[in-house]
Each structure stands twice: as C-alpha cells, then as structure tokens.
Image (spheres, helix red, strand yellow):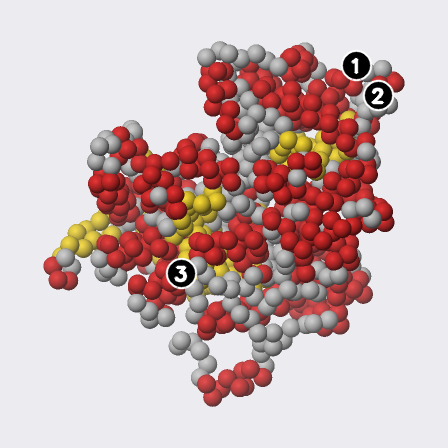
Amino acid sequence: VEASIPEPLREAWKKHSASEFTNKEEFEKELVRHIETTLARSLYNCDELAAYSGTALAFRDRLIIEWNKTQQRQTFTDQKRVYYLSLEFLMGRALDNAMLNVGLKEAAREGLSDLGFQIEDVISQEHDAALGNGGLGRLAACFLDSMATLNYPAWGYGLRYRYGIFKQEIINGYQVEIPDYWLDNNPWEFPRHDVTVDIQFYGNVKKYQGENGKIAHSWEDGEIVQATAYDVPIPGYGTKTTNNLRLWSSKASSGEFDFQKFNAGDYESAVADQQNAETISAVLYPNDNLERGKELRLKQQYFWCAASLFDIVRRFKKTKRAWSEFPDQIAIQLNDTHPTLAIVELQRILIDKEGLEWDEAWNIVTKTFAYTNHTVLPEALEKWSVPLMQNLLPRHLQIIYEINLFFLQSVEKRFPKDREILSRVSIIEESHPKMVRMAYLAIIGSHKVNGVAELHSDLLKTTLFKDFVEIYGVDRFMNVTNGITPRRWLHQANPRLSALIAEKLGSYEFLKDLTLLDKIEAFVDDKAFRAEWAEIKRENKARLAKHIKATTGFDVNPNALFDVQVKRIHEYKRQQLNIFGVIHRYLTIKNMTPEQKKKVVPRVSIFGGKAAPGYWMAKTIIHLINKVAEVVNKDPEVGDLLKVIFIEDYNVSKAEIICPASDLSEHISTAGTEGSGTSNMKFVLNGGLIIGTCDGANIEITREIGEQNIFLFGNLAEDVEDLRHRHFYGDFKLDPQLERVFNAIKGNTFGDAGDFSALTNSIEEHGDYYLVSDDFNSYVTTHDMVDEAFLNQEEWLAKSISSVARMGFFSMDRVTNEYADSIWNVEPLNIKEDE
Ligand code: BZD
C-alpha cells in the first residue's frame, strides 16, 4: 500500500502506461527496438539466437502487461485463490506457447520473415525449462496452462533450480549425464529482489509462558537462508488472464553474520556459507518414483514450503480477514507428498506465531489442503528419518508428534478393539530409525485425497490407504483422471492437424472445449478428409525422420510403421519388454525366406527417455537398446524391415516432434503400477494408435475411444499379486519365445552378454517381478495384430480419426474444473472484454 502512487497523480501515470503490439508492424518495431537496445546488437550482428531473444522480449512485454492487470484484477475481486505446490514444473519452451496463446504467431511469422528469419528456426533456439523429471512435473505445467486459460485465480509455487534435469548423451551406447545449466539469458523470469523470506533450519525449541499463562513454543537459533522470488508469467489461451508461477531461489541471508566473518578476515568461511545456502536450490533431484531420504532434499522441501506459506499468509493478512476465513480464501493443492511439510508449517504459523488454539488452527489447516497421490510403488513413498527431522526441523517434528497423538486418540476411540490398527496408521513407523510416513501425514492434514486414474484411485482405496478409508469414510478419497493441455499437445505440436480440424469444425473453439472434437467423427468416411489426415501424419513422420537423421545418422523410411516408446526409463514401465520384442522380431525376420519377407510390415522402433543416474538396471536397458540398434540397423538381411532408434535427451520440446509422428506408441507397464500415464493421451490426440496394458489411464482411454481402437494385452492388475507369489515359490517357466531372445543375447549377438546379465537374471533368477515373461506371448501376438491392422491403411485411418474424435475427456480443462468444483471450491474470474 505504501508503494502505491497517490490518487491525484495516477492520471499522468496512466497516460504513459505500457501498451501492447497488436500486429505485424508493431511487432517488428518492438523486435528491432529490443535487438538494438536491450540486446545492444544491430542488423550487422543479429544471429538466430539474438532474433529469438528479441522476439521473446517483445512477447514477454505483452505477457507482463497482462500479468500486472491480472494480479490487480485478482486482488480487487478478492475471490478464493488456488495455490499449486509442486517441486517440479516441466514447462518446456515458452515462446511458441506465448505466441499462440496471445494469438499473434502469424504476425510474428511474417514480421520475422520481413527481417530475414524463419520462425521455426527462431523458436528452436530456446532452451527447454526442464525443472522436472517426468509425468508429475509435466502435469503441473499442464495445470498452470489450464488454470490460466479458464481464468482461475491461481499461482504455482516451486523451486528455481540452477540445474534442471540433466541433459542425456549416449556415448558408446551408454547414458552420460551432462549438467543442464539453463538460466543464462532466460527472458521468462522476473527476479523480485524485494520479495524475500528468511528460512530457518536446525536450532532448538524453547518453551515459555505466553500470554494468559499458556505454554508457548519458540524455535530459536540455527541457520537462516534467504529465499528470493522469481516470477514466471503464465498466459492463458485466448484470454487476458496471465497467472504467476513463483519459483524460490536460495542464498545466504543478507544478515550480519557473513559480514562479521568477512570483516574479521574469515573470507573463506563466509564464502562457504554462501555456497552452502545456494546449494539448496542448486539442483533438481533426478529420480522419478524413488525417494532416497537425503537431507538436502528435505531442506529443499522445507525451504520451498516455508517460503510459499509465508508468502500466502502475508497476502491473506493484507485483507484483514479473520483467520477462520482462511480456507474460504485459499486452497492449497499438494502435488504428491513432496510439499507435505506445508501442512505442518501452516499449523506452526497459526499456533506459534499467530496465537491460535490448536483445534482452531488444525481445522483451518485441514480445510485448506488437499493431496494428490501419483504412485503406489513402495520405493516412491516418502519417509523421513525421525533423527534427521529432529535435527533439521525440531519444532516441526514436535508438531507432527502432536498431530499423530490426536489422530491416534481419535482412531482408538472409534476402533477400541483393534490393537493393530494404531501401529498400521501411525504417522510414525516404529522402525530403526523411526520414520515419518509423509503420505499418512498428507492424508490426515487434508480434506481430499485423489489418485490420477480410476484403477489407481481404486488401488489406493483398497490397498495403500485402506485403513484411512475405514477411518475417514470413502468420501475423503476420490479420483480425478489426468489430462493434457490441447494447446501445447495438439495446436502447438501439430499445427497442421489442428488447422484441419478447425477447418472442418469452423473454428478453433475446440482448443477451449475439447469435447467439440466429436464432430470430426462425421468426416471419418470423407475421402478427401482421410487423405489429408494421412498426409499430415506422413509429413510429421518425415519431420521426425529428419531429426533422427540429423541426430543419429540413421536413415528411416517414413512409410514404415513408427512404433514409439518415450518416457522415463523404469523397470515398471517395461522398456525391456519392448526391446525383447524387437529382438524377437529381428530373429524372426532373419529366419524368413525372401518370399516371407515381402509380407513383413516395415517398422521403426523408436525409444527415448532418461534413466535416473543411480538406477543401474534402467541404464542397462538403455545400453541394450543401443546395442540392438547397432546390430539391427546395419544388418543387410533386414534392411528397411526393421530399424531401432534411441533418441537422445528426450524432453518436452522433443516430445512435441515425436508425438505427432507416431503410428503406434507403447504404454506397457505391469498392470497396476502406472498411476495414469499422460503421454498415452498425447499420442492418441495426435492420431496415433496405442498398444498397452490394462493400466492407468489406458483403461479410460479404452472406454472413451472403444476397444476396437486400441491394442490391449497382458495380465490384469487383479492377477499380479498371485503371479508374483507363484514366482516367489519357484513356479516360474520362461516363455519359450523369450527364451529364444535370451539365447541370442547370451550368444553375444549384441555385444558382451555379461553387460546384460542383470536384465536376464532379474527375470530368470529373481522372480520376474514385473511379469515380463508372463506377458511376453500376449505382447508379441498383439504386435502381430498391429501389423495385420496396419496393412489395411483405410481402416487404420478410420481408427485414428475416430479415436481423436473421442479424446475430449482428456483435456486438462476438464481436470482443472473437476479439482475446482470438488476439491478447491473456487470459481473462475469474470473477465470483461473491454478491460
Ligand atoms: O505422475 C507420474 C506417474 O508415474 C504417472 O503415472 C502419472 O501419469 C504422472 C502424473 O500424475 N509420477 C511421476 O512422474 N513421479 C515422479 O516424477 C517423482 C519424482 C520424484 C519423486 C517421486 C516421484
């Protein structure tokens, strides 16, 4: 308030308020101005990178003007806001998205062309913002896009890692990790050096007599690290709303202690403190679906939760409302358990700082938070050692114990005869050392808990969180099936398909209401439409083939069936099943007569994905894929009938090239292990068919597009436990076709067999936990059905078109509205057009 310009002077201010370019001419003017002044370059010295920077700065100006207005509008209307807390935001590139969202891509294309540049080359200069591992981080990014597009007053909160997910190089068939330093000349962030929060670690808790004789607690001493806000504007599509993603960066507190040391000549130790503090936001942990309990990770979590909560509470306090209104004004969504400490931090703020009674505070907390679970894999469930937490966050541990005490007392009251339930549901696991179970804390501190696809949410209720369903009733648990933003994953990634659909539907309205896609089913028998549909797919495949040639040197035939599996490399996702299937195909082709070979459908098997640097088995899978590629791709007996490609450094911008180019993609996790999967949706939305297990969102995709349009195979989730049990007791026989594959590997067909023994052993010797052998026969016969189907191109096209027509359900806008209605209870803002 103190910083605002006095009323009588505002007219002068408004007269000079920044204005937005609206056409090609004005864009060119802004572009040249930025290149010549902001970037200090000239027409004699302007490469594509400078053209990119200039274009980005021009669009950034537009975004920030709308960002400012959006924030004013949201403050003025004072409606309930959503805060989405996620340790990962896998945003990808921003420029193309910004141009499309504000509707000025064509103006920019012509403007750049007038000045000597191709827009595609300019766009591809941008470095991906890769602050995430996989699906969880990308889901957060899709949320931001939808929340802005639907005009929800919403903020994202995350960490500003100096290093995002590593860049992957393949050297001699092995994955090598290269640091991803992405911050140099990133025009999309705004440092807010005036928005800082001091964050405390370590120290100890003192009890004292507070007002009216109450026992109170204060957390004293320890270390202070400073959080600085960096804001990233998030434009909605076809709306003025531009929301905010606030990322926190750490540095040593600008307090006295470092200067004291510095002045006392202890220069090295002052620098060490600085570096120590900066380490907190230095790097994204590169594991997906694995938690390893490292102290620095817990520091990251608390640093980010505490800074975000301070910011949220500060904003709330400005409204001068009663604390009881906090949950009417604020909804906080926890993206997995990573931000669970936010629950404890809010309780701490309310009781220790604001003097509320425990019960009153706890009531506010539980009404504010909701928790999304993304996995049932045991190794991904977060647990923190009690001694570690005691040391780092002593007051928080006390509060956790208190939460647990009240919770267990209530459980005991309800189930007085059940002695076991208390140890089963306790937040504290009685192991050595004791552990804090973060998922239980998240459930107890939230009013809603959701899974990300129907099967996944059912499994949560019947297995992992069964006791909590008994305790709280089934209404606390719900399903919200994931979705994807059609703006990036159709319009931006596949502009020609988007244009064809728009032409038939009469407008681009489907990008805001994806259920309108169902109207294209009427054209499924229209010859010209089909031909165009096929031509677009062919062109997208040619674009990918070009990328493959440029990056791997291999030629692939765009008329072959492109069979794609791109996602994080993980045993449960079963890239090993895929590559074993490829080897099976290779051996089969090699045994064919020339006559038989003529009937083979040519294939290109395309893989991509990163392995966590410490995940040995996943790295072995990558190695095998690359070794198989080396042998197959140069085998003259095979020629064009089979090619194997590993695309290096799979990321969001590569996904935008790959998804539109697939004929078939693989979503083949062991049934019951994949929360949802979201790339399955991206591929189908781009006209690809999928082969998959009855897992995650494959099940709802099947329900929507029809069984005739998907290739399902493999054992069902309900049979998995029994099969594993039988393997464990020695009831295991290797599938004979898989045995032939293993014999080839063991015969050194793909290099030293010793390199791959861990892979074959895990199946033959160690119980085949992921049921690769059990599903192998079903997998390869289903692939034969794919070939059969691909031979009939007309029918394949019909499947492709009607699948796309039925994908409306998987829009992130549907997802966002479901969260808004049944979890957050927030309304979109009304935007007047003339504002
Ligand atoms: O979340 C993924 C699930 O595996 C997918 O099935 C699901 O579709 C998406 C979105 O809901 N989970 C992750 O991506 N998880 C992680 O990346 C992760 C990262 C750190 C720690 C634990 C998990």
Label 3 secondary element: strand
The one of 596 and 555 positioned closer to us in this rendering: 596
Question: Mark 1 or mark 2: which comes first in sequence?
Answer: 1
Task: Provide the residue designation for mark 1.
Answer: 591
Q: Is mark 3 within 8 Å of ligand 1?
A: no
In the picture of the structure, the residue carrying the numbered disc 2 is 597
Disc marking residue 330:
3
Give how far across and how far down residue 230 sits, in percent: 49, 59
Residues under labels 1 and 3: Cα distance? 65 Å
Mark 2 residue element = helix
Residue 440, x across and y down, in percent: 35, 40
Residue at x 23%, y 54% (from the top left corner): 358
Instruction: Please identify the residue farthest to the left as the structure is shown.
Output: 213
Residue 88 shown left or right of residue 427 in the figure: right
Whether residue 740 sits left or right of residue 161 in the image: it is right
Number of on-image labels: 3
> Considering the image in quadrants, where does the C terminus appear?
bottom right
| Residue 570 higher or lower than 676, as above or below | above
Distance of label 1 from label 2 (alpha carbons): 9 Å
For the residues bearing labels 1 and 2, Cβ distance under 8 angstroms? no
**Residue 444 drawn at (x, y percent):** 33, 45
Q: Amino acid at mark 2?
A: Lys
Is the residue marked by circle 2 packed among few (<14), some (14-19), or many (20+) residues within 10 Å?
some
- Which residue type does callout 3 highlight? Ile
Of pointers 3 and 2, the one earlier in the residue sequence:
3
Q: Residue at x 80, y 28 (%)?
A: 601
Evaluate if marks 3 and 2 touch, with contact meaning CB atoms under 8 Å apart: no
- Closer to the N terminus: mark 1 or mark 3? 3
- Determine whether the residue tagged by mark 1 lies in a helix, strand or loop: loop
Left or right: residue 605 compared with residue 484 = right
